[in-house]
C-alpha cells in the first residue's frame, strides 16, 4: 500500500555484507522491461503446464490501474523481458495468491484489488482468474462484493481438502477499518460475499494460513496497521474462531507483510513481519515465536536493529546451516538478509543488494530446476483428528509428487496445497489407528530469488542462486529408470540403477529403518531374510538425491 508521494530514504550498508556464503549476486541477473508497470503482487507457479515455473505479477498498487501479467519460463530458467500474457482488464492490483482452486490440474490466480476504479474514494474487491487449460482467462470470472483489500491468501479454512480464499481488508490512509474475511470454496467457485468474518475490526495488510497451534487444522494470521497482529485458531473440529485467540502486545503496530516458518526447533511455527513507518511505528522487522507457550498476548521475541519503509519478506535457509534466515525489502531500499541462529536471528545485516528499488514482494523457487531434491515424509498414525500435515523442511517445496495412504495412491481430489508452502490439507482426517501417509515431494535447497518492484521506471528482478547445481534435473529425477526385482521378494532383492547407488534404506510404513546398505555400485543385492512379510519402502540415494520405491516382502 503506497501513496504516490516520493520519500527520501537513507540506505546504509554494513561491513562484510557477503561474509556468510550468501548465494546471490549483489546486482540482479535479470530485469524485466519496466513498461511503466507498478508491480505489486507476485506468484511463482507453472501456469502453462510445461513443467517450468512462470512469474505472475499483479500491477497497479494505488498508483495506476494496470493489468495482471505472466512471464513464461523459456524452459531453461530464463525469461523474456516483456510479459508473455496480460489480462484484458485493469485495476489497482495489490498482492496475489496462486493455487489450483477448482482442482482441474491447472494453477489459478486470486488477486486483491486495493481501491476501486475511482481511486481512494471507492473500495476494491478480490477476484480470481481461472486457468483454462494452460492460460489464465483474460478477465476474472469471479469478483467479490466491494471492500478495500491489499492482500489475499489461499488455504483450507474448512478442512475439506480444497483451497479457500482469505482476505486482508482495510484502507489505512483513510482510517477505513474492516473485518478479516474468508470465501469458502464450493466445487471451485466462491460466493460474492464472505462466508467467515472476524468479530473485530482490523487494519489488515497481509494474511496467511498455517497450523499455528499444531492441532491438525489451518489457522489464520493477520498483520496490519493501527491494530494488533492477530491469530484466529481453528478448534479441534476445524472451525476457525471469529474472535482472535492471540494478539501482539505492542500498543500500535504498522506492518506491511508477513511470512511463517519453524524457527529453530520450535514445536509451533512463528511468523515474521516487516514494519513500515510511513504512518507510524519504528518500521522494524519482528519475530513472534510460540515455541514455549501459547499466550493470549505477547511481544515480539526479536526485532531488527533498524527500521524503515519495510515491505516484502520471505523466510528461507539461505546458507544451508539448518536455520531459517530473513530476506526482506523496503521502499527505495536494497534487498537485505539477516541470518538465523539456533534460537533467533542475528542483529546485523549479512547481505544487501546494490539495488534501491521499491521492493514489494519476494518469492523463491528453482526456476531452472538445477537443484531439485526428492524427499519422502512418513506420517505415522496420529492420536487425534488431523487434516493439516506439515512437511518439515526449511527449503522451498517445489512440487508434491504423490501421496499414499496405507499404500494406496491418493487422488489430488483428496488433498490440497499451495506452491512454496510446506503444509498439506486433507479432505478426510488422518486419524484412523493404523493410517500411514507417505508423501513424496520435491524441494530445492538452492532456489532463485524473484522480486517485484512498484517504481515504474524499474523492472522486476531475478537473483539466480550461485551455488553449483547438484545433479539431476526434475525430468531425470522423476523418470529415472530404477529396476527392482523380484518384487514381491522373499529372501533377496536386487536394485539396478543407471547411476552409482550411494545407499539404500528399507523402511517400514512407520518410517523405521529395518536395514541399510551402501553398495557404491550400479547393482545392489539386498538380504531381506530377516525382514517380516509386509509392505515397505526402498529409499535409494543416487547423486545425492533420495528416490523412494515401494516393495513387498512375503
Image (spheres, rainbow, N blue to C red):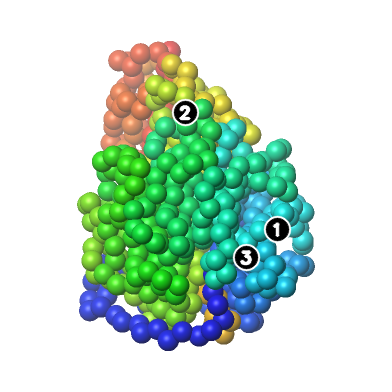
Residue on which the image places disc 2: 236
Viewer-closest of 179 and 441: 179
Secondary structure, mark 3, is strand
Q: Position of residue 299 (x, y in %)?
A: 30, 54
Viewer-closest of 552 and 177: 177
Q: Of discs 1 and 3, which sits in the foreground?
A: 1
Viewer-closest of 391 and 290: 290
Answer with mark 1 or mark 3, whichever residue precedes in sequence.
3
Residue on which the image places disc 1: 146
Q: Quadrant of residue 383?
A: top left
Instruction: Assign the N terminus to one quadrant of the image.
Output: bottom right
Seen in the picture, residue 174 relative to 8 is either above or below; the reply is: above
Q: Is residue 365 visible?
A: no
Q: Position of residue 235 (x, y in %)?
A: 47, 32
Q: Is residue 226 visible?
A: yes
Q: Residue at 46% of width from left, 84% of height from top?
A: 7
Residue on which the image places disc 3: 114
Viewer-closest of 91 and 433: 91
Amino acid at each position: 500500500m503506497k501513496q504516490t508521494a516520493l520519500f527520501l530514504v537513507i540506505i546504509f550498508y554494513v561491513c562484510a555484507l557477503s561474509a556468510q556464503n550468501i548465494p546471490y549476486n549483489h546486482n540482479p541477473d535479470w530485469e524485466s522491461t519496466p513498461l511503466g508497470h507498478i508491480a505489486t503482487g507476485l506468484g511463482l507457479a507453472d501456469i502453462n503446464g510445461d513443467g517450468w515455473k512462470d512469474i505472475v505479477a499483479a500491477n497497479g498498487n494505488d498508483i495506476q490501474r494496470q493489468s495482471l501479467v505472466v512471464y513464461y519460463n523459456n524452459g531453461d530458467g530464463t525469461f523474456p523481458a516483456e510479459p508473455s500474457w496480460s489480462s484484458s482488464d485493469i485495476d489497482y492490483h495489490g498482492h496475489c495468491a496462486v493455487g489450483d482452486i477448482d482442482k482441474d490440474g491447472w494453477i489459478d490466480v486470486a488477486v486483491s484489488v486495493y481501491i476501486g476504479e475511482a481511486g481512494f474514494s471507492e473500495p476494491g474487491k478480490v477476484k480470481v482468474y481461472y486457468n483454462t487449460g494452460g492460460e489464465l482467462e483474460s478477465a476474472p470470472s469471479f469478483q467479490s462484493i466491494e471492500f478495500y483489500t491489499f492482500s489475499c491468501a489461499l488455504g483450507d479454512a474448512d478442512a475439506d481438502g480444497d483451497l479457500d480464499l482469505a482476505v486482508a481488508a482495510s484502507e489505512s490512509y483513510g482510517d477505513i477499518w474492516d473485518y478479516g474475511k474468508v470465501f469458502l470454496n464450493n466445487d471451485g467457485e466462491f460466493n460474492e460475499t464472505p462466508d467467515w468474518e472476524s468479530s473485530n475490526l482490523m487494519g489488515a495488510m497481509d494474511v496467511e494460513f498455517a497450523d499455528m497451534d499444531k492441532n491438525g487444522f489451518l489457522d489464520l494470521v493477520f498483520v496490519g496497521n493501527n491494530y494488533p497482529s492477530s491469530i484466529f485458531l481453528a478448534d479441534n473440529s476445524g472451525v476457525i474462531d471469529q474472535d482472535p485467540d492471540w494478539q501482539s502486545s505492542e500498543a500500535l503496530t504498522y506492518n506491511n507483510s508477513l511470512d511463517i516458518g519453524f524457527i529453530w526447533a520450535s514445536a509451533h511455527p512463528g511468523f515474521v513481519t516487516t514494519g513500515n513507518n510511513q504512518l507510524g511505528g519504528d518500521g522494524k522487522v519482528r519475530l513472534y515465536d510460540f515455541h514455549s507457550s501459547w499466550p493470549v498476548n505477547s511481544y515480539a521475541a526479536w526485532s531488527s536493529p533498524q527500521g524503515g519503509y519495510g515491505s516484502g519478506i520471505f523466510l528461507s535457509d539461505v546458507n544451508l546451516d539448518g536455520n531459517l534466515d530473513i530476506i526482506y525489502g523496503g521502499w527505495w531500499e536494497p534487498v537485505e538478509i539477516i541470518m538465523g541462529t539456533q534460537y533467533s536471528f542475528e542483529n546485523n545485516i549479512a547481505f544487501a543488494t546494490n539495488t534501491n528499488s521499491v521492493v514489494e514482494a519476494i518469492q523463491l523457487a528453482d526456476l531452472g530446476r538445477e537443484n531439485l531434491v526428492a524427499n519422502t515424509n512418513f506420517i505415522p498414525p496420529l492420536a487425534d483428528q488431523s487434516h493439516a500435515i506439515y512437511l518439515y523442511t526449511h527449503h522451498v517445496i517445489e512440487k508434491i509428487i504423490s501421496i499414499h495412504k496405507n499404500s494406496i495412491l491418493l487422488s489430488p481430489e483428496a488433498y490440497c496445497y499451495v506452491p512454496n508452502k510446506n503444509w498439506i490439507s486433507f479432505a478426510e482426517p488422518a486419524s484412523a489407528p493404523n493410517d500411514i501417509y507417505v508423501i513424496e515431494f520435491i524441494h530445492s535447497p538452492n532456489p532463485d530469488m524473484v522480486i517485484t518492484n512498484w517504481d515504474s521506471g524499474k523492472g522486476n528482478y531475478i537473483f539466480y542462486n550461485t551455488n553449483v547445481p547438484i545433479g539431476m534435473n526434475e525430468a531425470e529425477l522423476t523418470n529415472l529408470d530404477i529396476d527392482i526385482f523380484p518384487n514381491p521378494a522373499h529372501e533377496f532383492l536386487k536394485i539396478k540403477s543407471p547411476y552409482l547407488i550411494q545407499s539404500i534404506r528399507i523402511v517400514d510404513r512407520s518410517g523405521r529403518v529395518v536395514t541399510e546398505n551402501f553398495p557404491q555400485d550400479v547393482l545392489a543385492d539386498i538380504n531381506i531374510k530377516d525382514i517380516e512379510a509386509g509392505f515397505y519402502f526402498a529409499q535409494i540415494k543416487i547423486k545425492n538425491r533420495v528416490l523412494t520405491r515401494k516393495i513387498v516382502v512375503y
